[in-house]
Amino acid sequence: MSFPLPPVATIVIAQLFGTSLWFSANSAASSLMQAWGISEADIGLLTNAVQLGFILGTLTFALSGLADRFEASRIFMVCALIGALANAAFALLANDLSSGLPLRFAVGFSLAGVYPLGMKLVVSWVPERAGTVLSQLVGMLTLGTALPHGIRLAGADWPWQQTILVSSVLATMAAILIWRLGDGPHLKRQTGASRIRIGRVLTAFSIPQYRASALGYFGHQWELYAFWTLTPALLIASGLAERGTPQISGLSFLIIGIGSLGCVLGGWWSQSIGSARVAATALAASAVCCALFPIIATASSAWLMFLLLIWGATVVADSPHFSALSAKACPPEIVGSALTLQNALGFAITMVSIQIGTAVVDAWGVYTSWLLLPGPLLGLWGLAPLWRNTRN
């Protein structure tokens, strides 16, 4: 089937559109808090409903072997459409926390077939450039995460439901793009190949390189999604923006969205120094930002905004390299399942940091950043066997 865009460009654009579902509700947090009479901690519950859905979805794909048993493009397409429908139902049908939580869970479950399978699609098309292209892919996930804030800013006068519906339209477009593209020539299952045994993916943890990459990823995840969730609250706590103003959406879009540039630059740099050292550098830089944020918050607004932009760029720049390192360490027949399992466990960690962070941010203010600091520090320790090895 002829296609107007190169495969990598198609996957990257589809990832941008599909992952806009992730934080679509967070972009309307102020409106939801006012309309439903809920708190910042309740916004954390809505975010964690997505995370829990994603975790259970990735575990389903990983432990059953579905991620390697069916074409990745078909799984992506179906899941993007289901996510678009669940997101639209949240915008049009939900009227309180109890009705909204199941729909956000459904969005998260569907994203398990979008984000990890997007990574497998990249490997199926350009395995020799996995580290660089996965950087572009995670860059688009980051921009997709920021996109609802940008949509909210552009449509400041729109009802919150309309800004959320835009993400459903984009996810539908993502499904169409990947359906037309199909799978690449690499990592296809051979005719007559034996079925993947349920639970075989757990053997990946016996591989030292995979284990080190996964431990680094788990520390990274403690910080990443909690930072993205808390960005509007940290802006308010630091005095950079006031609640309910378009400024929150604009600054959140910049701080989260600049992570896409960090991913692209990290992918380029990895060609010279390797994925493990790029990941270690990003972990160290974001750890410094975590530590300095409460201190810089007492300085000028310009310095504080500069720190937040550096934090936003480095907090996610390491993410694609954990995927590249893990994919490199695993046998080809379990790559999809191993990546989805790593995602599932990492996102389980995000639920803890998100829930604690949103519960204490009103009381702790700018010092909430110190809650995130153990993540990158532990990630550096876990990844040490790889970043000390010049071949990675």
Image: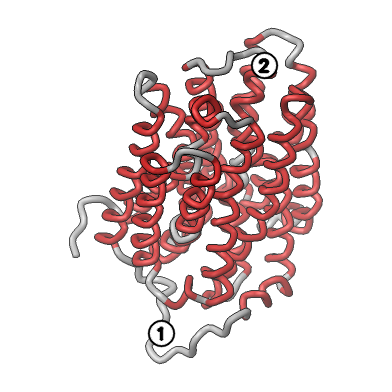
Find disc 1 in the rendering and name its residue: 190
Taking the spot 57% from the left edge, 17% from the top edge, the residue there is: 243
Quadrant (top left/top right/bottom left/bottom right) for the N terminus: bottom left
The secondary element bearing badge 1 is classed as: loop
The secondary element bearing badge 2 is classed as: helix
Q: Amino acid at mark 1?
A: Gln
**Residue 53's disc number:** none
Q: CA distance from mark 2 to mark 1?
A: 54 Å
Residue 100 or 28: which is nearer the viewer? Answer: 100
Residue 241 point in image, percent of width and height: 58, 14
With 293 as the anchor, is 306 left or right in this view? left
Quadrant (top left/top right/bottom left/bottom right) for the C terminus: bottom right
Residue 326 point in image, percent of width and height: 62, 63
Examine the rendering and report whether any part of residue 257 can be seen: no
Q: Amino acid at mark 2?
A: Leu
With 5 as the anchor, is 154 left or right in this view? right
Residue 389 or 142: which is nearer the viewer? Answer: 142
Which of the colour schemes (rainbow, by chain, secondary structure, one colour) is used? Answer: secondary structure
| Residue farthest left in this picture | 2
Q: How many marks?
A: 2
| Residue farthest top in this picture | 300
Taking the spot 65% from the left edge, 10% from the top edge, the residue there is: 301
Taking the spot 68% from the left edge, 65% from the top edge, the residue there is: 210
Find disc 2 in the rendering and name its residue: 304
Q: Residues within 10 Å of mark 2 (few under 14, many from 20)?
A: many
Residue 226 or 314: which is nearer the viewer? Answer: 226
With 227 as the anchor, is 370 left or right in this view? right
N-terminal label among 2 and 1: 1
Given this view, does label 2 or label 1 mark the residue nearer the observer? 2
